[in-house]
Image (tube, helix red, strand yellow):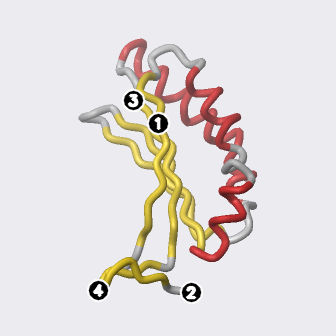
Amino acid sequence: MTTTIVEGVSFDTIAREWRCKWSADNDKASLASAQKALDSVLSEVKAVDGVKSVQRVVCGGCLDFKVVTALSADKFGDWEGAKFAPEESFLEKIKAIDGISTVETQTYTLMPM
C-alpha cells in the first residue's frame, strides 16, 4: 500500500524512532547500558506484526543512540494503537541510566529513492 502526501511524495513505510543522548563518561557506560536495554526488548520489537526492519544508530561525535523500527504503512496503526509496545518499557529503562539524557520519540515516513 502506497500513500501519497502530495504529488511526487509517497510512502509505504512508517517508522517510529526512539532516541537519546549518551555520555562518554565512565568509559561510555551509558552507551553500553542503552544497548543492554535495547537487547532486552529487541525480540518483542521484531515480533510486532508488519515490522520490516529494526535499526540501531549510534553517533560517536554527537553521542546519539537511536532505534528505528520500520513497519508497513498498513500495519503501523495497529502498533500505534498498542502504544508502540514495548516503547514505554524501553524508555523507562534508558531514562534510569546515568549519563542518558534527551530521551525522545518521533514518527516519520520512509521510502526508498
The CA distance from mark 4 to mark 1 is: 30 Å
The CA distance from mark 1 to mark 2 is: 28 Å
Determine whether label 1 and label 2 are within 8 Å by CB.
no
The CA distance from mark 3 to mark 4 is: 34 Å
Determine whether label 2 and label 3 are within 8 Å by CB.
no
Of residues 94 and 78, the one nearer the viewer is: 78
Q: Report whether 34 appears left or right of 66.
A: right
Of residues 3 and 65, the one nearer the viewer is: 3
Q: Amino acid at mark 4?
A: Gly
Determine whether label 2 and label 4 are within 8 Å by CB.
no
Q: Report whether 96 appears left or right of 106.
A: right
Q: Which residue is mark 3?
A: 21
User: What label does residue 1 carry, if any?
Assistant: 2
- Residue placed farthest to the front in the image? 6
Of residues 53 and 85, the one nearer the viewer is: 85
Give the label, 3 or 4, closer to the camera: 4
Q: Amino acid at mark 3?
A: Lys
Question: Which type of secondary structure does the marked residue at label 4 adopt?
Answer: loop
The CA distance from mark 2 to mark 3 is: 34 Å
Give the label, 4 or 1, closer to the camera: 4
> Could you tell which of marks 2 and 4 lies nearer the N-terminus?
2
Question: Which type of secondary structure does the marked residue at label 2 adopt?
Answer: loop
Q: Which residue is mark 1?
A: 104
Determine whether label 4 and label 1 are within 8 Å by CB.
no
Residue at position x 71%, y 44% in the image: 86
Tag 3: Cα neighbours inside 10 Å, few (<14), some, or many (≥20)?
Answer: many
Residue at position x 39%, y 81% in the image: 10
Give the label, 1 or 3, closer to the camera: 1
